[in-house]
Every structure is written in C-alpha cells, then in structure tokens.
Amino acid sequence: MVKGDNMLNNTLINKPDSKYDHMINNKIRKNTNKNKIKEGSLAFNIALYTLAGFFALIAIYPMYYVMIMSISKPMDVAARNVYLFPTGFVTSAYSFVLKDPILWSSFKNSVLYVILTTIIKLVLCVLAAYPLSMPRLAGRKYVVWFLLIPMYFSGGMIPSFLNITRLGLYNSIWAVVLPASVAIWHIILTRTYFTTSIPNTLREAAMIDGANHYKTLFNIYLPLAKPILAVIAIYTIVSVWNSWFSATIYLPDPKKHPLQMYLKKMLVDNTQFETYSSIEEAEQAIVNQMVKMQLQYAVIVITTVPILMVYPFLQKYFVKGIMIGSLKG
Amino acid sequence: MKKRKIGKEYIVENLELYSLLLPAMALIFLFDYLPLYGITIAFQDYSPAVPIFSSAAKWVGFKHFINFVNGPYFLRLLGNTLRLSVTQLVFGFGVPICLALVLNDLRARYFKKFVQTASYMPYFISSVVVSGMVLSFINADGVVTKLCNILGYSVKDISMAPEAFTAVYVITNIWKGFGFSSILYLSTLSSIDAEMYSAARIDGATRWQQMLHISLPSIKPVIAIQLILSIGGLLSSNSEMILLLYNSAVYKTADVFGTYVYRYGLLGGKYSFTTAVGLFSNIVNFILVLIANKISRRMLEFSLW
C-alpha cells in the first residue's frame, strides 16, 4: 500500500522530466511541417466545442426530457409527442404526488437515516483516526491489520444478512444505519489528514501544557479537521440518500422505508402488471397507467431536482474528495 | 525507578488512546468480522435452527462449490458477468478520458464550468431513479423503443429483449459515471506545468499535437491505475443496477453472480449454497486483482501495493 502511495504521489506531483520534454519537442517539430493547422485553428475549436456540447447534452437531456414530460398535457405524454419543449404547463401530476402521505413519511425516514449515519460516521472517524495518528500507540501494527483485512475480504451478502438477523437488528433502522456508519476507508482518510496536515509540535505543546489525549483531540484536532470532515460528510449524505439495497434486505416494514424504496416501488416494480378481473377494471387500469406515467416523471423531478440544485455548490468538495482518495490509491 | 514511571505514563496514555479506538473497532468487529466468520456456512448445510457457533453444524466440505460449478447456471452467470464487464470496459473506459481532454482544452471559462457541472450531474441521481428513467424509456411505449422502431430495429419492448440488455446496462452505467470519473483525469491534467505547453507552442505545435503529446502522456499513470482497478473488478459487475434493470424475461443475458445470490439466497433461503457462490466469485475477483497488479508492476513499473 504505502509504496504505491508514494509512487502515485510522485507521478501526480512531479513534472515530467526533461528528456521526456525533448522527445515531445522532436516529435512535434517533425509534425509541424506537414500539418498546416495552426494554434487555435477553427476546425479544432469547432470539433472541441461540439464534442463538449455533445457531452453536456447527453448528460442533461434525459433529465430534461423527464422534466418536460412531467408538466406536458397528459394526452401528449401518453402519445410520446414531447421532445424539445413542454406542451402546456400541467401541474396535476405534482399535486397528486405531493398529496401522497407515503412520500412524506419515506422522505422523513431518509432524512433521519442520513442524519444518523453521518453523525455516527463522523464521530467514529475522528475518534479512531486520532489514536492511529499517534506515534506512541501500542500495537499499532495489529490495529492497522485489523482495519485492512475487511477492506480486502468481506463476508458477502448472505453472511451479512444472517449476521444482522442474529444480532437482532432485522427490521430495525439500525440495520441500515450502523453498517453504513463504519467506513474503514474514511477512518484512514481522516488519519492521513491528521498526520499530514496537523503538525506534531502542536500536539506536543498541548501535552506539555498538561492536556491529556481527550483534551488534545477535542480542542486542537477537531477544529482543524473540519475540511476533511466536510468532504466525508458530503459523500456520506449522497450515498445514504441514494441507497436502497440495505433497506430492501433489512427493512420489511413499509413504515421504515426510505425514499429510495418508495421510488423503487413506483418506478421499477410497477413493470409487473397486475391481472384484472373485469373489462371495466382493465379500462380503469389503462387510464391509471396513463396518469401513472406522468406521476412517475413528477416523482423523479420532485425527488431529484432538489439534489441537483444543491450539488453545484458542493462540487468542489466532491472534486477534493476524489483527489484525496486517489492519492491513497 | 525512572523507567517505571515512564511505563506507567505509557499505559495511561494507551488506555486513553484505546478508549477512543474502541467504538470503531467494536462496530467493525460486529459488522465486518462476524460476517467473515459467517462464511463458514459455505462449507456446511446451514439451517437457521442451529446456532452458528454450535458443534451441531453439519460440515459438508466443498459440496456446494462442486454442485454450483457443475450446475446448469454456472456458465451462464460467468458468461453474463464477463460479457457485461468487458463490454463496459471497452466502451466505457475511454469516455471519461476523452471528456477530460476536451474539458482541459476548453478556453471559454463559463462554458467549461457548465459542461463540467452538467456531466457530473448523473452521478448524483440515485440508481433507483436512473433505472426508473431508463425503464420508462425502453418499455413497450417508451421513447427509445419508439425511436428504435423508426430506425429499423423492430422491437416490441426493449426491457423484455434479452439481446438488448448488455447495451441497456452499459449505456446506463456509462451515462451515470462518465462525468464523475473524468474528475480524476481532469485534476491531473490541470497540474501539468503550463510551461510545457508554451514551450511546445514556440516549437510550433498545434493544440491537437499538444493534447496528443503533452496532455495524454501526462495522465498515462492515472489511466494505468484505473485500468488495473477495472480489470481487477471484472467479476464484480454492478449487481445493484442489474437488480433494478432486469426482469425474468432477460435473465438469460442479465443474471450475474450477485443477482443470483440475491434471488436464491435472500429470497429462496438457500443460505449455504449461495454463500458458496458469493465466496467463489470473491476469490476469483481477488485473484484477478492480484494478477492485474502483477502485470502492471512488470509492464508499467507501477503497482497498487
């Protein structure tokens, strides 16, 4: 691990060396004579901007499509006649969806799970990372092994499920919260931050002044750890908010379902159609189906747009998180 | 005398430190180590009535592994897993690199910001919503199905067509991740010394040549690492996404180890057998990581550990 870290660090930070430079220049010189395209040529710029625009369009259009479908006239939605602009501004689907009490209860559950998981994870990270960054920790080697083994080997789906059941957590919200709160990876990130960004002398000075480790941690390390904790918190919030699988496995009780489970039932599971006993019922079902389609789009917009509105402001934290993560391999 | 005093301090200090470590270690033990021990049921005929540590457990050795490998589903699962992962790698690996190179060369600042923000966006949409969207596009009256029929690929319902699942899965995954994966490449690109580019310009290099001979070589190490990581993960397809996208009509091409374990283990209650299946795919995966790492160490003089 450690060796790889250093090498990656070097490759990312060091400038390419000069013999390399020379090689590049030679190659370029050879090419310039036959290649008449000049710096900033029109063709190159057009290609560049078209490609960039294409990438942006690909990323945005499906979401945009969902949005215009959710407010277009139901007839056009059913006929799939909406492509570029909404036909009309119909909000009936929204008012219908927003009246659903299950949407709100699952929304509340999701918020609860996000808050609990994030708080527990941050506390664990700070508490565990501090001793790991102390040079005088006895048996540090064994503690590090204890942390590393689960990163490479995991029990898998069934042993985890049986374990949760045996611990008596089946159908308890802690089955979703606690396993998500222990992220060894994040403990290690926090530890690396402690060892690289907080000078040892600061701790030594505090210790000389008579502070014990608890005081040093809470008065000196914790305030300085804010940047890394912000990154971890934001990643945790997004991943818990978007997670659905552990709830599928561990929470049979619909009252405890998070928002993603509500969405799954509405968007994914409805592909299996029920059987109808009479023609009227079937007709009713077709009408429902038409409405349902637009409801689906409205639900997607309601649950997704808030995140998409907030995330551009948090973008720098995600970029930072990726960089920190990559430096550790 | 003096030594003893230090010893006492040392013990007190470590008691403090370990009291801080305790909560995390306890939870790791509960939720990571106990399931690791639980793997033993792969070598037993597990029944929920018998407690896991008891001596009454029936040991059956490698019975479940042999049954699985000789069973009718083994080749199908292996084939599907490999096909989905390899297709994903072939078509998806270059996209973020391409995006990063394009973004790095964009001069218009606000347009660049816009493209960045737009392309990262799908990453923040949950898998459930993404699959919901995709399914609504590809079901019998979805817009993609309609387009396919116009373009000459006559199909009634893409979500029910086994031959289309690979494409659906790969495109969905690429769409969700390409922008976010480009961040790593882009930040490496932005750390390139600007003097390199100006030197090349003085020598008459076009921007295309600069991209090819400066930008691309500079991110080569990062590309190598990402490639190793994805080869190591060839056998761990995104089964959460598959669970959301597939249905019984496309099991033939969509079923992978993870989804099989989910259906037969969690829903079907064949705990021992599916634990063996999961363990098998984990071990093969681990071996793949080791091999990929070894190759890269030899060929690129770079390794993960």
Image (spheres, rainbow, N blue to C red):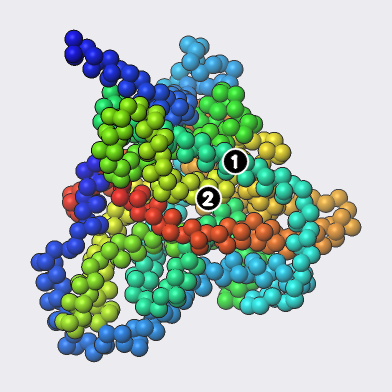
Q: Nearer the viewer, residue B234 or A256?
A: A256
Q: Residue furthest front?
A: A209
Q: Is residue A49 above or below residue B12?
A: below
Q: Secondary structure at mark 1?
A: helix
Q: Quadrant of residue A245?
A: top right
- Do residues under tags 2 and 1 come within 8 Å of each other at their CB atoms? no
Q: Position of residue A51 (x, y in %)?
A: 42, 76
Q: In the image, what residue occupies the spot 39% across and 55% down?
A: A320
Q: Position of residue A264 (x, y in %)?
A: 65, 50
Is A97 placed left or right of B139 in the picture? Answer: right
Q: Is residue B273 above or below residue B7?
A: below
Say which amino acid is labelled 2: Val
Q: Is residue B201 visible?
A: yes
Determine which residue is flagged by label 2: A238
Is A107 placed left or right of B105 in the picture? Answer: right
Q: In the image, what residue occupies the spot 16% across and 73% down?
A: A24
Q: Is residue A200 visible?
A: no
Is B27 placed left or right of B216 in the picture? Answer: right
Say which amino acid is labelled 1: Tyr
Letter of the chain that mark 1 sits on in the rendering: A
Q: Position of residue A25 (x, y in %)?
A: 14, 76
Q: Quadrant of residue A303?
A: bottom right
Q: Nearer the viewer, residue A250 or A209?
A: A209
Determine which residue is flagged by label 1: A113
Q: Residues within 10 Å of mark 1 (few under 14, many from 20)?
A: many
Asked whether the residues under marks 2 and 1 belong to the same chain, the reply is: yes
Q: Quadrant of residue B305?
A: top left
